[in-house]
Image: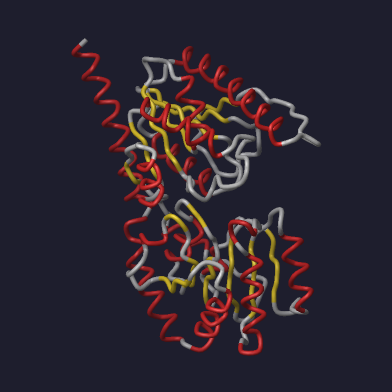
Amino acid sequence: MKKIAFITHNLCLGGVQKNVALLANTLAKIYAVTMILFEEKAIAYPLDNHISIITLSHHSLTLTGKESVELEQIGQMLFDARSLELGNLLEKASFDVVIAFEDYNSLCTLQALPSQTKAIVSSRVSLEYGYKDRLIHLLPRSFYETQIKALYPKAHAVVSVSHGVGVELGMLGIESLSIANGIETEKLLLLAQEPIPYEGEFFLHVGRFDTTQKAQDELVHAYAQASSKLQSALVFVGDGKDRARVEALVAEYGLQKRIFFIGFDANPYKYMQKCKGFIFSSHYEGMPNALLEALSLGCAVVAYKFEPSWSEFDGKEGILYIDRSDTLALSHALVRFENEPMLRSQLGQGAQKIIQVYRYEVCQKKWIELIESVIQKENRECAES
């Protein structure tokens, strides 16, 4: 049986983590699968009992009071230490194929990759927007661009989570194959039947509170502008670093009895199924799980034109798009959702057409075909040598 390793940061909550777990469980029926994690965090998604788990060493870091240059130096040392440990592990284990998710983990993998091991790497984040003006794993955007150009050509295949991310990779000279996140529609429909602790009509936002990316504050501003014309409440499902700031903004508007914060819920689908409209206010996303899940449940969706992937859904009559940060247009969209049931119905029907290409079985089939092609190429090379 061929040996495959998945390499990712952790299996804590998140869209990447969910899709890694789903793919690993599928492949565990075919291959001997190992999960290599960079961090020891609670695993949020069930794994097949046959999957082995290895966690790299923990590194205690003192970051308080450090300047940006010092943080980047620490980030580089941590990257090198992880690559060294990973390289030793891969050399001893002799995996046939390793599959790394997200650019940081992929770069560590490619820097450490033994010559006899094949690698598939998957880029999940917008290079243009996701790395802008901040350090990711204590490393700047320039590090990622330089290292992607240098190391991604070593991979047997590069997978982009969307055509938009693929275009950005292409600007760095990297060819990629686009495979989106797969959505388990039937499972979501079952989970969506659970009751919720709210009886009135409501608009819904689902996601972690990170206003730089997901702009929950702008949604509050838009709702406040239209509040006199709205009967439906606004419900946030999720948690995160900016939740308190958004709650304070709601208090400033005096809308505590109309805007509600549920917190994290492992089953947001029960809210999606019952909402009057799903509001997707992200400025940028690689390929948003929450949006795909809402579409799979037939939600009427209004969304910002999130970069770099919004255009993949454009013209398919399943999403009402508005320009990013246009809170006036967003407030008008809320009023339309409130008053135009025909619009909501049309968008819901369009959503069902959009989601077909993002079904779990469709996307997993593409992954399996890719992995098998890598293994078959390895077999041909061995036979010819």
The answer to whether residue 242 is above or below residue 76 is below
- 54 vs 188, left or right, is right
Residue at 60 percent of width and 59 percent of height:
207
Residue at 36 percent of width and 55 percent of height:
359
Residue placed furthest toward the left: 384
Q: Position of residue 45 (x, y in %)?
A: 56, 44
- 349 vs 381, left or right, is right
The answer to whether residue 187 is above or below residue 195 is above
Closer-to-camera residue (226/279):
226
Closer-to-camera residue (222/94):
222
Residue placed furthest toward the right: 65
In the picture, residue 203 is in which quadrant?
bottom right
The answer to whether residue 245 is above or below residue 172 is below
Residue at 32 percent of width and 42 percent of height:
177
Residue at 38 percent of width and 71 percent of height:
318
- 152 vs 373, left or right, is right
Q: Position of residue 261 (x, y in %)?
A: 70, 67
Any part of residue 50 in sight: no
Q: What colour scheme governs how the chains and residues are painted in the rendered image of this protein?
A: secondary structure
Q: Position of residue 92 (x, y in %)?
A: 48, 12
Closer-to-camera residue (214/9):
214
Q: Position of residue 75 (x, y in %)?
A: 64, 29
Image quarter hosting the C terminus: top left
Any part of residue 258 in sight: yes
Image quarter hosting the N terminus: top left
The answer to whether residue 149 is above or below residue 321 is above
> What is the tally of numbered marks visible in this picture?
0
Closer-to-camera residue (8/49):
8
Residue placed furthest toward the top: 385
